[in-house]
């Protein structure tokens, strides 16, 4: 991955201050803590700072590359490049930055320990709606896992030595020019060897620079890798858009489908998002004042229970959990309780993302703001599949007690952090 020219690290108090303010200026406080909730491998860079440095790196990115956050922040992304990184991929990324557009490219990168890996890199710009300029770039890295073994310059050097030794011992003929690297057959062209033919080289691997450095071109990203990268971009973009609302500097990415997510952003502020993320139970928060009552917050436990990712549920109605055998009478009961602004508990058949059904002991309740108006509805889910008694206990707590505890925690967070909120 390469993000711009130059190679220096940032140092000094003034430079560190600029790095810290890079995200805080267009986004409200807590943006870094909110971004930390994502499991994606990604960085955020600032093209207006010297050398286009990384100003945020996710935990997934750090684990993937082996670097610490201190070794990454303030540094240009080119440190992931190595001797066998294809220059054409680097140029493609650089050109996308110059044109302020998205790009997807397969590139060979290197971890801190020198290990190489194929990376499906997805770059996307973040635009300021007010000023119309790019304020950040998001770079998502998705390792391409299932791939034949990479042929690098070290592999070539070692196999040349083995081949030369074998040739000397057995008086091998011209066929010894064919070298095999795992499942990748290599026709190696040394400076003094005959031309082995362009077509054969293209079918296996291409030579990089007459120094024996070669890169295998058979390793391609799968459609699932591309979808994962796209989902990460949309999810991070929606979070940036949400936090930007409270600084009066809205952002967007015209290359990503984040319109629905941005539309629900005003319901939740940054402090409330962080407070809700600390509640360790399965629940969602929906906004009754927006069309279709979309989900504006989903807990990690809810995502684990249903199998959906956060970007797949934010902005969607809870009907995504319904299926062919869901009892419509239960749906009507929930709908009536919402109209009456009353709590409701039902045992309803819901469906996970993979289509598997489960019995959900669902408790819904209105959540009012400081002025007494209904701001949200909270839905607390409990998987009771195979359990006959809805009031089963867990460590002395009945299901009802657990669900009421979640509702209480959500109400405290909303009243403390949302203020008057929606008044409709």
Image: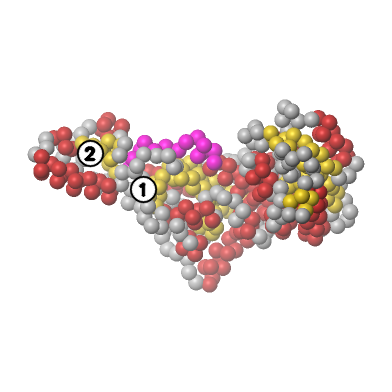
Q: Is residue 4 visible?
A: no
Q: Which mark is residue 264?
A: none
Of residue 345 and residue 126, the one placed in the foreground of this image is 345
Q: In the rendering, at what x and y percent does residue 200 appear?
A: 26, 31
Q: In the rendering, at what x and y percent does residue 245 appear?
A: 70, 53
Q: Which residues are magenta?
A: 215-228
Q: Which residue is mark 2?
A: 179
- For the point 49% across and 42% down, the residue is 103
Q: Is residue 217 magenta?
A: yes
**Disc 1, SS:** loop
Q: Which residue is mark 1?
A: 85
Classify 236 as above or below 71.
above
Left/right of residue 296 with respect to residue 16 in the rendered view: right
Displayed quadrant of residue 320: top right
Colour scheme of the rendered structure: secondary structure
Displayed quadrant of residue 216: top left
Q: In the rendering, at what x and y percent does residue 348 appear?
A: 77, 36
**Disc 2, SS:** strand
Of residue 366 and residue 237, the one placed in the foreground of this image is 366
């Amino acid at each position: 991955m390469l993000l711009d020219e130059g190679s220096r690290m940032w140092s000094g108090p003034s430079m560190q201050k600029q790095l810290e303010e890079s995200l805080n200026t267009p986004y409200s406080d807590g943006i870094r803590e909110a971004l930390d909730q994502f499991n994606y491998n990604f960085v955020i860079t600032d093209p207006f700072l010297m050398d286009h440095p990384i100003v945020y790196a996710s935990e997934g990115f750090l684990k993937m590359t082996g670097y610490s956050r201190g070794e990454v922040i303030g540094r240009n992304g080119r440190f992931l490049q190595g001797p066998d990184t294809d220059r054409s991929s680097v140029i493609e990324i650089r050109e996308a930055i110059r044109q302020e557009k998205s790009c997807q490219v397969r590139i060979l990168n290197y971890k801190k320990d020198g290990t190489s890996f194929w990376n499906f890199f997805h770059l996307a710009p973040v635009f300021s709606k007010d000023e119309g300029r790019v304020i950040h770039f998001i770079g998502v890295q998705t390792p391409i896992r299932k791939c034949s073994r990479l042929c690098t310059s070290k592999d070539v050097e070692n196999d040349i030595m083995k081949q030369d030794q074998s040739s000397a011992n057995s008086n091998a003929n011209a066929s010894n020019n064919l070298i095999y690297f795992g499942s990748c057959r290599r026709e190696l062209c040394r400076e003094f060897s005959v031309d082995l033919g362009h077509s054969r080289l293209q079918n296996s691997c291409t030579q990089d620079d007459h120094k024996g450095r070669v890169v295998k071109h058979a390793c391609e990203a799968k459609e699932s890798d591309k979808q994962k990268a796209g989902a990460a971009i949309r999810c991070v973009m929606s979070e940036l858009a949400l936090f930007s609302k409270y600084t009066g500097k809205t952002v967007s990415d015209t290359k990503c489908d984040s319109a629905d997510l941005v539309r629900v952003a005003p319901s939740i502020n940054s402090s409330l998002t962080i407070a809700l993320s600390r509640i360790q139970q399965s629940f969602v928060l929906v906004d009754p004042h927006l069309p279709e009552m979309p989900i504006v917050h989903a807990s990690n436990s809810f995502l684990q229970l249903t199998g959906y990712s956060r970007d797949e549920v934010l902005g969607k109605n809870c009907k995504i959990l319904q299926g062919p055998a869901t009892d419509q009478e239960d749906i009507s009961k929930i709908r009536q309780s919402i109209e009456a602004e009353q709590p409701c508990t039902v045992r309803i058949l819901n469906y996970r993302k993979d289509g598997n059904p489960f019995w959900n002991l669902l408790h819904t309740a209105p959540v009012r703001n400081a002025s007494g108006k209904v701001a949200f509805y909270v839905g607390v889910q409990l998987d009771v599949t195979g359990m006959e008694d809805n009031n089963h206990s867990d460590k002395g707590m009945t299901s009802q007690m657990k669900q009421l505890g979640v509702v209480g925690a959500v109400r405290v967070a909303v009243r403390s952090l949302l203020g008057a909120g929606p008044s409709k």
